[in-house]
Image: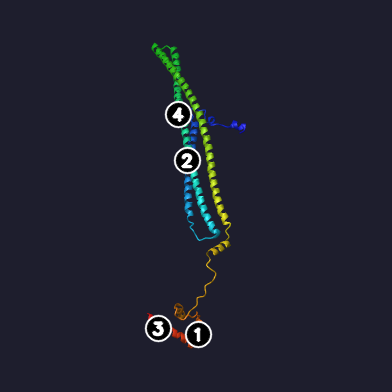
Amino acid sequence: MLLADVKMYQTYSDSFWGSDLGSCAGYEALSKRNLDSRKMCDDLEKYLKKRSKLEAEYSKSLQNLSKCFKQREEVGVMEKSFNKFKSEIEAVAQCHNKVAAVFQQQSDIVKKFKEDQTFCRKALEDQLQKSQNFKLSQLSKTIQLEKIYVRKFTEKNAAGQSFSEISLQQVPPKELEKARNKVTKTEEDAIKADSAYKSAVKMLESCRTSWEKDMTLSCQSIQDLDEKRLDFLRQLLWVTTNVNSSLALEIDNSSESVREVLEKCDVASEIQAFIQAAKTGNEHPEPFVFRHYTKIMGADNSDSIHDPYCTIEDVEIMDIQPATPTVAKFGMGFSKLLNKRSTSS
């Protein structure tokens, strides 16, 4: 700090006075400062407490959200990507949970600091208010005695002037005595008023000196508390900002770890991986062809004639061609089969 800056630097004990002895502007300004300081700490404590609650709720919601990813039939790098994605959601949820604990801890620190400051500020404010009220009370009393003092001396002077005028006139001795007694009475009252006024002024000066001392000490103490409060708030807000930055960095690192896995994901490779893991073969099924009922029955019965499949064209040829020995032989075999089934039934 430059020398010029040092000379220009003002303190509370230099800056909250006034030429009017009855003014309370300095006291009111400091009282408002105390109130605003407490409210600022209240606001910060409330923010940290609510932020902690939000972070805890968000952490819990993320953990529940990660359960949306069930075990699926996925292969290759995509399977690893999904697993990594799910695990990083859980990791981010844990980060938010840790942040919730940090904010709750900071909230408790602010609360403790606020209570300590409130206690000290209240003690200073009470002492200053007591001194201020005593000064104002004595000032009011002194002003009243000053008015009485002025009035009594005015009455004394008026009585003396009146007595001087009456003395020069031809008045009855009784009136002259009355005027003389009034002068004596007003002089006594003036002396009493003078004494009371001087005592009040002396007492007021004592009160003013005491109040000025209390005011100076209070200003110094309040400035000291304010300096501590400002330093505390600066450090706390710095830490809070760092917590936000750290959280953002951890989330970004978590996202980057997922991206690193996804960079290895190739669509063609994923397709080939699925084929290798789940393929069922490369031979296509034979066409389903029509079979004559006799051949179907023959294929189902071990005693029947086992002829190979025939096409529809073969059946048509069989229906058109005349009976041949082979056909006759087949007919005899078919009749034999029917008789056998009838006997067994």
Residue type beneath disc 1? Ile
Mark 3 = which residue?
A: 339
User: Label 3, label 2: how many angstroms apart (C-alpha)?
Assistant: 101 Å
Residue 139, numbered circle: none
Mark 4 = which residue?
A: 130
User: Which x, y percent locates residue 85?
Assistant: 53, 55
Secondary structure under tag 2 reads helix
Residue visible at 53% across and 47% down in the picture: 247
Residue 47 can be seen, yes or no: no
User: Which x, y percent locates residue 193?
Assistant: 44, 19
Secondary structure under tag 1 reads helix
**Left or right, residue 336 beside residue 245:** left
Q: Quadrant of the C terminus?
A: bottom left
- For this rendering, which residue is in front, 242 or 123? 242
Secondary structure under tag 3 reads helix
Residue 317, numbered circle: 1
Say if 167 sits above or below 56 in the image.
Answer: above
Nearer the camera: disc 1 or disc 3: 3
Could you tell which of marks 2 and 1 lies nearer the N-terminus?
2
Could you tell which of marks 3 and 4 lies nearer the N-terminus?
4
Residue type beneath disc 4? Lys
The local crowd at label 2, few if under 14, some if 14 to 19, many if 20 or more residues have their Cα within 10 Å, is some
Could you tell which of marks 1 and 3 lies nearer the N-terminus?
1
Could you tell which of marks 3 and 2 lies nearer the N-terminus?
2
Nearer the camera: disc 4 or disc 1: 1
Mark 2 = which residue?
A: 108
User: Which x, y percent locates residue 71?
Assistant: 49, 58
Residue 209 can be seen, yes or no: yes
> How is the rendered protein coloured?
rainbow
